[in-house]
Image: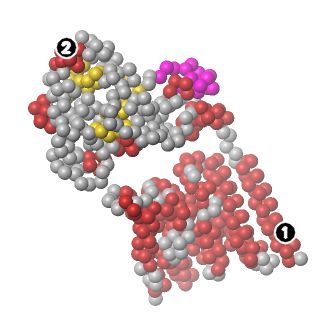
Amino acid sequence: MEILIAFLVMFAVAVVAGILLLVISHFFAVPENPQKQIIRECLPGINCGACGYKGCDDYAAALAEGGVKPSLCIPGAQSVADRISDILGIEPEPIKDVVAFVACNGYCEANPPKATYEGVKTCYAASMIYGGAHSCRFGCLGYGDCATACPSKAICMVDGIAHVDTARCIGCGLCAKTCPKHIISMLPQETLTAVMCSNKQKGADARKACKNACIGCKKCEKVCPNGAISVVDNLAVVDYTKCTNCETCIKECPTGCLKSVFFPDIPENCEFEDLVD
Amino acid sequence: METFKLLIVILLSSVLVDNYVLSRFLGICPFLGVSKKLDQATGMGVAVTVVMLIATAVTWPIQYLVLNPLKLGYLQNIAFILVIATLVQILEVILKKFSPSLYKGLGVYLPLITTNCAVLGVTINNIIDGYNFLESMVSSLGCGIGFLFAMVLFSGLRSRIDDSHIPTPFRGLAVTLIAASFISLAFMGFGGIVENIFA
């Protein structure tokens, strides 16, 4: 008899709880956009955050609500943008492939350390102490924060400089956000000419800091037939809407920091970690 | 006045002396799992506090109006687990409807609390200590604040740990557990203080 009472009481509690849950979830149900689930399945699902949303779920929700461009997913590239445009019934728009580019040429011997740094081996920590131990305060610190941030393991550190394997680079831009020196930028994939320096000091100081620095001599600015190069703050800047990759500037550059960048530009002794799925 | 004094003592002792995480070692998994960042730790702490309050408000009447009259006190654990799980689910549905921003902020923490032992521990301890309804509510508020307090303290400590040199064998969970034990030791120092505040 006692067992029966116990059983009945628990059964009653469970039934009351179940009915309550059912009623409440029925009355307070939030209608979900059915498109969201379909869009979410199209996205790569690596939650890289390159689109500017918290993750693939968040971006899918924003897309389903409308008013958001379907071309923001960089890893997914054109195929994903097309499929999403198809689902939403809007005109697909072309997206340009971008890859990460490290604007620094200061290899170990070119950019000698001005002090010995023995702190935590991350660029972020090193940059907080007098801008790092290298003599150039603009250049790559070489501790590889970008390589750690890279979801596709496309960055390796050789001779104190970060190198990007553009074949692996998915263009998410996480490395550019991570770099405390802000020397990584996202360039169009067909880029062939780039300034591999970020030093904004005057010519003599820049040269003293690093053998390979841009000294702001304006030679490239003068020889460029398309007017694509301008020197801003003692540093050459290439306008990629005008550059035709004629390489005239590369022949003129006295320090060799204007380089013909044939992607992928990777040294031979680069060892990439294997991708873990 | 006496009641008020008693309530204050219950509140303070459940925050400091009988801190659920640091003295009773309940709710350790969120304590170690979501204490990496301050905002996450605060979110989890607030969520646990709210759930503890609601759970006590429902389980106390169940114990004294349903289980005790029927002499079914031994079913306490099962009944409370059932009720708390339901409550958290209901809270989640209601939050989703009326406060989507708070729902988003709490995110994954709400469903995590469904089986949090600290919540079950508070409701059962309130019965064991023989508190009346008001005392139970104050005690669970104190436990929630204590949990929040421990989470915030520990997230601060962890951000300091992240910025420092740690010998390789200690990295990760090992140093986290050592740090947790130090905080726990520090909280032992509160023992016996609260009872003598009004003496």
Q: Which residues are magenta?
A: A81-95
Q: Nearer the viewer, residue B13 or A153?
A: A153
- Point out the tag, 2 or 1, that comes first from the N-terminus: 1
Q: Residue at point 65% right, 56% down?
A: B91
- Label 2: state its secondary structure: helix
Question: Where, by quadrant of the figure, is residue A108 drawn?
Answer: top left
- Label 1: state its secondary structure: helix
User: A75 above or below B51?
Assistant: above
* Residue B170, horizontal then vertical, whole percent: 40, 63
Q: Residue at point 32% right, 59% down?
A: B165
Q: Residue at point 50% right, 75% down?
A: B23
* Residue A95, horizontal then vertical, whole percent: 47, 22
* Residue B104, horizontal then vertical, whole percent: 56, 48
Q: Is residue A83 magenta?
A: yes
**Residue furthest to the top:** A225
Question: Where, by quadrant of the figure, is residue A89 drawn?
Answer: top right
Which amino acid is tagged 1?
A: Leu
* Residue B75, horizontal then vertical, whole percent: 75, 73
Q: Residue at point 57% right, 40% down?
A: A57
Q: Nearer the viewer, residue B169 or A2?
A: B169
Which amino acid is tagged 2?
A: Val
In contact (CB < 8 Å): disc 2 and disc 1: no
Q: Which residue is mark 1?
A: A8
- Foreground disc of the pair 2, 1: 2
Q: Which mark is residue A223?
A: 2
Mark 1 neighbour class, 10 Å CA radius: few under 14, some 14 to 19, many 20 or more:
few
* Same-chain check, marks 2 and 1: yes
Task: Answer whether residue A16 is visible to the viewer in this image.
Answer: yes
